[in-house]
């Protein structure tokens, strides 16, 4: 989990002072608080083979997140696809020390739910707002899996 | 969540540490999806063996690896037995029957895989070695709860038999098989089996290849979490065509249930499949959609073909019969490696019928238990051809080779000339 000195709603990141710009609320499905940069795509990652298990790097050809790692990130995907081996690739990356810090799945399906159960990190789901227009890749986020909140820093 | 007394006892560790760890993950999964209760799982199609994703654990000890990667427990517990009410299949293997040149598992890896599999056998798992459990005796009946690590098998058994299962994942399937429970959620509940989107089928898929391509054409247009209801005046598919259709559809869209009006049991009529609700939309699938799907799966100029892999999902005996008949007296190009994949029990039938002999005389190899996605590719493959959209899509992430897609006839014709002969 990426830990940042928590000073209320301010963060010093990359030499810049950032504040909470927006708070979005959904259902907190698995508890805990974590922060990290957004790895977000409305196009889901193909689980079986889409992630390098030793580095957490997305290797799916042509994927918007290709070449970036899910390590310590807040992973936000709309769906799962491909094999039922969706969860194991994220799970293996976690075992290799390269798992995400928190998860946001706007709508759960059985495979994303199992992934959350396996990774055992904060999860927010049932989000009505369109996260894929509100959040950009790399945005700093705080996820509260108890309250179900997603705070976007800017 | 409401747990029964017995479920609470399992969770409290009264029935041993393995059942406790398994129940912990199932309860966590249930809480995440907001399930009110668990249901009894009586069939489990698993993913046993020394698969490559387990390499992240720097240990050779089965119980260390199984505890961390399947039970999601940092504490090591010993796998003794699966739930005695649950019939367990091992699923696709990491190894294959005859290992041709360039696909050899190193001896120590082979031994490790065999060692892992023997632990599953000791725990009561049947070594099935295939991705088509529904053709080899894994038969959950209507309303019966199952788990399966094969996305195409989940779609087949939900749709064709009215059995109840979700895509879940490998860890949840192992845990369900051990504690005999899974969350009563998703496709285990009748209200989540109602059709959401009507599909007007304006094409006439006839061959297995047509159905495979149709599965991909539909999958690339289907919204997430949709339960399609197929309507229209199209030829009635058989179970072998549905095997191909469901594999492509599940791979492209993650679909877990698909109603076909007049054919699948929950779709006697379109209204019945929709439970008299209005569909979210009607998706039209026409010839242009099939052509666009074909273009996405192909797109390289005619070139030499190094490798042809057929049998995804694993071939039915009738597919092997037709291929053997096609190959009688033919000779494949010596520079093109051809692998056909099936289940061990089906290969035994092919051996008895003489199909295996005909296929191998022509220069192809009939393999069991695995596939390139789980076993890897022969060395030096720069071009590869498939008769399965699923295998073609998976291959894009597994090899840098130029990829081709066509019917099995086109693939074998290419293997004869050594050049791609499809569209």
Image (spheres, coloured by chain):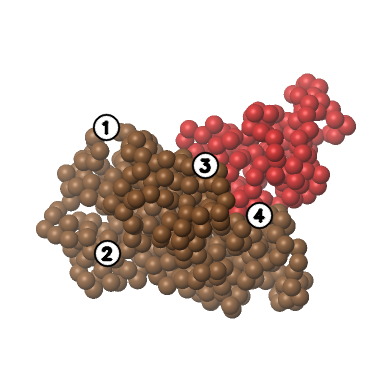
Q: Chain of mark 1?
A: B
Nearest to N terminus: mark 3 or mark 2: 3
Q: Report how far apart the C-alphas of labels 4 and 1 lie in the structure.
A: 44 Å
Going from N to C along the chain, the mark reached first, 2 or 1, is 1
The residue tagged with tag 3: helix, strand or loop?
loop
Which disc, if any, is residue B301?
1
From the image, tell me which residue sits under label 4: A118
Residue B228 in picture, x, y percent from top left: 49, 50
Query: Which chain's colour is brown?
Result: B
Q: Secondary structure at mark 2?
A: helix
Q: Using the rendered image, report if marks 3 and 2 lie on a common chain.
A: yes
Q: Specify whether B139 is left or right of B416.
A: right
Identify the image quadrant of the N terminus of chain B.
bottom right
Residues marked 2 and 1, same chain? yes
Residue at x 43% of width, y 66% of height: B134
Determine contact: label 3, label 2, CB under 8 Å. Answer: no
Write the residue at 73% across / 76% down. B6
| Residue occupied by mark 3 | B281
Which residue sits furthest right? A8
Which label's residue is closer to the chain start, 3 or 1?
Answer: 3
Chain under numbered label 4: A
Q: Chain of mark 3?
A: B
Q: Is residue B139 left or right of residue B81?
A: left
Mark 3 to mark 1 CA distance (whole Å):
38 Å
> From the viewer's perspective, is the residue at label 3 or at label 2 nearer?
3
- Which of pointers 3 and 4 indicates the residue nearer the eye? 3
- Residue topped by disc 2: B318
């Amino acid at each position: 989990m990426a830990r940042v000195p928590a000073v209320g709603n301010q963060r010093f990141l990359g030499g810049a002072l950032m504040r909470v710009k927006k708070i979005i609320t959904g259902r907190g499905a698995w508890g805990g608080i974590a922060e990290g940069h957004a790895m977000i795509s409305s196009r889901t990652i193909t689980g079986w083979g889409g992630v390098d298990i030793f580095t957490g790097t997305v290797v799916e050809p042509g994927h918007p997140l290709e070449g970036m790692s899910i390590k310590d990130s807040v992973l936000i995907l709309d769906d799962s696809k491909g094999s039922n081996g969706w969860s194991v690739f994220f799970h293996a990356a976690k075992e290799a020390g390269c798992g995400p810090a928190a998860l946001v799945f706007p709508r759960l399906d059985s495979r994303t739910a199992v992934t959350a159960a396996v990774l055992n990190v904060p999860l927010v789901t049932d989000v009505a707002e369109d996260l894929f227009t509100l959040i950009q890749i790399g945005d700093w986020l705080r996820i509260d899996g108890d309250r179900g909140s997603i705070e976007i820093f800017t | 969540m409401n747990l029964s007394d017995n479920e609470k006892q399992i969770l409290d560790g009264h029935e041993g540490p393995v059942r406790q760890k398994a129940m912990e993950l199932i309860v966590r999964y249930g809480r995440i999806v907001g399930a009110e209760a668990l249901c009894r799982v009586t069939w489990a199609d698993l993913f046993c063996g020394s698969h490559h994703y387990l390499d992240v654990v720097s240990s050779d000890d089965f119980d260390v690896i199984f505890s961390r990667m399947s039970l999601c427990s940092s504490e090591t517990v010993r796998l003794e037995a699966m739930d005695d009410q649950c019939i367990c299949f091992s699923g696709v293997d990491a190894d294959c029957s005859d290992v041709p040149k360039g696909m050899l598992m190193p001896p120590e890896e082979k031994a490790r895989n065999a060692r892992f599999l023997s632990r599953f056998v000791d725990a009561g798992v049947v070594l099935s070695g295939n991705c088509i459990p529904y053709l080899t005796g894994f038969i959950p009946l209507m309303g019966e709860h199952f788990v399966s690590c094969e996305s195409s098998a989940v779609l087949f058994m939900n749709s064709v038999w009215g059995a109840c299962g979700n895509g879940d994942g490998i860890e949840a399937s192992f845990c369900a098989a051990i504690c005999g429970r899974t969350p009563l959620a998703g496709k285990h509940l009748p209200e989540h089996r109602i059709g959401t989107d009507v599909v007007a089928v304006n094409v006439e898929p006839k061959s297995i290849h047509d159905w495979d391509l149709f599965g991909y054409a539909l999958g690339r247009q289907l919204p997430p979490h949709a339960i399609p209801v197929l309507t229209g005046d199209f030829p009635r598919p058989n179970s072998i065509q549905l095997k191909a259709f469901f594999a492509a559809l599940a791979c492209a869209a993650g679909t877990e249930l698909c109603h076909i009006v007049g054919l699948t049991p929950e779709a006697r009529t379109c209204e019945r499949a929709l439970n008299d609700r209005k569909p979210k939309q009607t998706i039209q699938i026409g010839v242009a959609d099939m052509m666009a799907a074909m273009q996405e799966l192909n797109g390289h100029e005619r070139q030499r073909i190094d490798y042809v892999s057929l049998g995804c999902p694993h071939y039915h005996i009738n597919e092997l019969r037709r291929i053997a008949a096609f190959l009688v007296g033919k000779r494949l190009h010596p520079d093109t490696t051809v692998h056909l994949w099936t289940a061990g029990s089906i290969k035994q039938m092919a051996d008895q019928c003489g199909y295996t002999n005909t296929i191998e005389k022509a220069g192809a190899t009939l393999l069991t238990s695995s596939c390139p996605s789980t076993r890897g590719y022969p060395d030096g493959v720069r071009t590869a051809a498939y008769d399965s959209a699923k295998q073609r899509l998976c291959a894009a992430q597994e090899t840098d080779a130029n990829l081709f897609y066509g019917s099995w006839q086109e693939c074998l014709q290419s293997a004869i000339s050594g050049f791609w002969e499809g569209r």
